[in-house]
């Protein structure tokens, strides 16, 4: 009937106006974003609470869309995972992060290490090691200054193949971090099985510290376990001085979060380092 047709139209129009329309805008925009140079990397410091030194930065991608403004990676990375664009974007992130470290070197600003997030498709595609070798050669960055962040979920998709890939990367001298630790519902046995250098305690365990006794017990135990396994332990999402004090007292040697700094543009990170050296 006429009414039903009208409802359908309203339904589609309403739908297209928000989520579907935005997704379409994003998919089309993503196709052009690389050549239009709309991506940027921001860098969030990881700070040693005992020495107050910046020991590493995590590279986090930003997308400046001409109409949508800044789009969060939490929204567009999953789309690029689905349509495969993450491969090119992931390569761009690796290249840009490594050359940025060299650019800071040349500028007299020493950032010891950069951590780069890998996506599942990038990790399991079989050409990752070759890409990393190429990027390190082209930028001249020492391999030990690059850290690759992987998640439990990525490793567990194909544990046997993952061990091989990680061994290849380790053989290059690159560091491996396990991101969002504790959120992957997998067993602890993989900590023994995979050759890892660092473990990043997910923000969800840091939020309740130090008032919530369960969160505090988990955070304290993970720091102790990581240290006993010889891993660098990084606490993510540190927002308050109380969290900082508690994690420091647990012996956590690297802290990352808004308490110290939000992810910063390359220029602002440079200023942050110069200020911290002066302080
Ligand atoms: P992630 O790797 O777990 O990154 C940490 C996220 O927490 C970042 O969000 C960071 O800005 C945010 N964060 C840092 N400190 C705090 C804090 O104190 N409080 C709160 N509330 N948040 C904090 P961002 O930059 O929006 O990135 C979201 C996710 O997108 C990342 O989570 C990562 O999974 C993904 N992502 C970002 N950049 C890349 C990239 O270059 N490649 C890939 N494959 N994924 C990326
Ligand atoms: Ca990460
Ligand atoms: Ca994380
Ligand atoms: Ca996360």
Image (cartoon, rainbow, N blue to C red):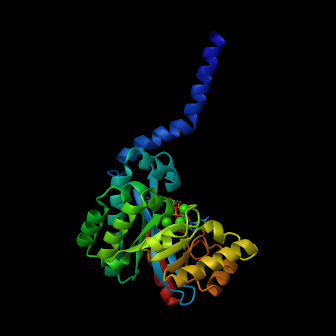
Q: Among all residues in the image, which is located at the extreme top?
A: 1
Instruction: Report the residue at 50% width, 83% height from top.
Output: 275
Q: Position of residue 256 (x, y in %)?
A: 55, 74
For the residue pair 235 and 183, the one nearer the viewer reads as: 183
> Is 36 situated left or right of 6 in this image?
left
Residue 209 in view: no
Above or below: residue 154 compared with residue 2: below
The answer to which of 270 and 74 lies nearer the viewer is: 74
Q: Quadrant of the C terminus?
A: bottom right
Quadrant where the N terminus is found in the figure:
top right
Q: Nearer the viewer, residue 180 or 135?
A: 180
| Count of labels in the image | 0
Q: Is 147 left, or right, of 152 in this rendering?
A: left
Q: Quadrant of residue 194?
A: bottom left
Horizontal and vertical percent for residue 21? Answer: 52, 36
Q: Position of residue 171 (x, y in %)?
A: 30, 75
Residue 271 image position (x, y, % from top left): 47, 78
Does 18 sit above or below residue 235?
Answer: above
The answer to whether residue 76 shows anywhere in this view is yes
Residue 160 against residue 11 in the figure, above or below: below
Horizontal side, residue 151 vs residue 183: left or right: left
Q: In the picture, residue 163 is in which quadrant? A: bottom left
């Amino acid at each position: 009937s006429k009414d039903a047709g009208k409802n359908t139209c309203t339904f589609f129009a309403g739908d297209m106006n928000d989520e579907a329309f935005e997704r379409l805008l994003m998919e089309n925009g993503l196709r052009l974003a690389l050549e239009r140079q709309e991506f940027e990397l921001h860098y969030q410091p990881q700070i040693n609470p005992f020495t107050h030194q910046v020991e590493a930065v995590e590279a986090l991608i930003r997308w400046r869309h001409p109409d949508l403004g800044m789009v969060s990676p939490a929204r567009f990375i999953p789309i690029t995972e689905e349509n495969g664009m993450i491969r090119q974007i992931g390569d761009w992130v690796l290249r840009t992060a490594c050359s940025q470290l060299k650019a800071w070197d040349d500028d007299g600003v020493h950032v010891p290490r950069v951590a780069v997030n890998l996506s599942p498709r990038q990790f399991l595609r079989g050409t990752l090691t070759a890409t990393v070798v190429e990027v390190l050669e082209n930028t001249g960055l020492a391999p030990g200054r690059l850290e690759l962040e992987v998640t439990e979920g990525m490793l567990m998709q194909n544990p046997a193949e993952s061990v091989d890939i990680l061994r290849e990367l380790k053989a290059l001298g690159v560091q491996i971090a396990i991101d969002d630790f504790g959120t992957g519902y997998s067993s602890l046995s993989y900590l023994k099985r995979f050759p890892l250098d660092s473990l990043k305690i997910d923000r969800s365990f840091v939020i309740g510290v130090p008032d919530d006794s369960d969160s505090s017990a988990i955070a304290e135990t993970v720091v102790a376990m990581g240290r006993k396994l010889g891993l660098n332990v990084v606490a993510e999402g540190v927002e308050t001085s109380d969290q900082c004090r508690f994690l420091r007292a647990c012996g956590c040697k690297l802290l990352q979060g808004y308490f110290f700094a939000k992810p910063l543009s390359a220029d602002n990170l440079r200023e942050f380092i110069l200020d911290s050296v002066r302080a």
